[in-house]
Image (cartoon, rainbow, N blue to C red):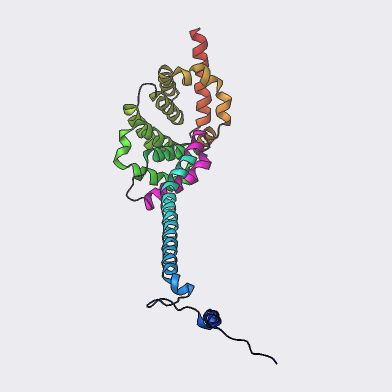
């Protein structure tokens, strides 16, 4: 005969404890505290971080825009100076015709984009020098007028500028203007510098056919700067003059006045004087 097992009070206690640990009987949070998801627990922090990154992105965008803007403004400011320096380098190498275009561009940029900044005197002087020595000065008459207008009342203050203006007039057939400006330049130039101007006046005298006056002006140039205008140098350059572009241009401009023949006669007479003085 089978007997049913006896359940003791100790067994009841153990069974009750086991049932109390089941999932349906999991312990509840303390009073006033509810269980929250990850988003609920960290959502405010995520929003703060997202906002911070948004502010950083906006700041970086503004910074790069401002940097680009500053670079563009700097480029606008320095571009005329860059062109000016490149053109001056060409003039220093006697590449006058190649220098005129960048000189013109730099000059106009200063006049239009830098209306509060005067055109640098170095640019004006270099432009004037290039115009006076270009192979075809007549072609650049608008540029010459632009430069002279810029100089305005300051032109007579500097002998070097007067000398260059005179050369331009001489090479474009304006003999009277050339002579007047050369004579004004003599009053403003230093002793040695004036040798260039005396030689130029000798050249004008050749156009006039006045060989005596031409020789006298040449001798004055020789006294002031024998390193450039000695009789030996000038007579030795006879054939070089015949090939030099600017001398050829003068020969064409003053063909009726027999400029070339007068030059040859002056050199012949200087050679005779030198032989007689030995």
Identify the residue at horizontal 48%, vertical 8% (top origin).
277
Answer with the quarter of the image where residue 176 lies.
top left
| 55 in magenta | no
- 235 is higher (above) or lower (below) than 102: above
The majority secondary structure of the magenta stretch comes to helix
**Picture coordinates of residue 173 (x, y %)?**
44, 39
**Is residue 254 something one can see in this rendering?**
no
Q: Determine whether, in the image, residue 220 is placed left or right of residue 236.
A: left
Residue 117 percent coordinates (x, y): 33, 47
Instruction: Reply above or below: 109 against 181.
Output: below
Which residue is more in the foreground, 78 or 139? 78
Q: In the figure, 66 relative to 242: above or below?
A: below
Residue farthest to the top, as pictured:
278
Rendering quarter of residue 220:
top left
Q: Specify the segment rendered in magenta.
A: 88-117
| Left or right: residue 107 compared with residue 157 | right
Please indicate whether residue 155 sits to the left or right of residue 4 in the image: left
Locate residue 14, reporting x and y percent: 54, 79
Query: Residue drawn 33% across and 31% down?
Result: 184
| Residue in the image at 40% along x and 27% along y | 197
Task: Give the residue drawn at x 43%, y 28%.
Answer: 200
Q: Which quadrant holds the N terminus?
A: bottom right
């Amino acid at each position: 005969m089978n007997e049913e097992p006896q359940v003791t009070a100790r067994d009841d206690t153990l069974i009750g404890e086991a049932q109390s640990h089941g999932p349906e009987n999991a312990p509840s949070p303390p009073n006033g505290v509810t269980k929250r998801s990850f988003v609920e627990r960290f959502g405010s922090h995520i929003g703060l971080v997202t906002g911070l990154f948004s502010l950083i992105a906006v700041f970086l965008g503004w910074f790069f825009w401002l940097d680009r803007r500053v670079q563009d403004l700097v480029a606008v400011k320095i571009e005329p100076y860059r062109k000016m320096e490149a053109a001056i380098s060409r003039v220093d190498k006697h590449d006058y015709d190649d220098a005129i275009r960048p000189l013109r561009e730099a000059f106009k940029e200063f006049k239009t984009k830098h209306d509060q900044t005067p055109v640098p005197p170095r640019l004006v002087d270099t432009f004037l020098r290039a115009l006076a020595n270009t192979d075809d000065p007549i072609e650049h008459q608008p540029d010459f007028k632009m430069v002279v207008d810029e100089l305005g009342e300051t032109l007579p203050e500097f002998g070097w500028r007067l000398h260059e203006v005179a050369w331009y007039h001489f090479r474009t057939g304006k003999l009277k203007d050339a002579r007047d400006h050369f004579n004004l330049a003599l009053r403003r130039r230093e002793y040695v510098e004036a040798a260039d101007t005396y030689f130029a006046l000798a050249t004008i005298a050749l156009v006039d056919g006045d060989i005596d006056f031409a020789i006298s002006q040449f001798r004055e140039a020789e006294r002031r700067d024998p390193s450039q205008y000695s009789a030996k140098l000038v007579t030795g350059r006879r054939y070089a003059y015949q090939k030099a572009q600017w001398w050829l241009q003068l020969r064409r401009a003053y063909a009726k006045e027999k400029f070339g023949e007068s030059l040859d006669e002056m050199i012949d007479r200087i050679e005779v004087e030198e032989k007689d003085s030995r």
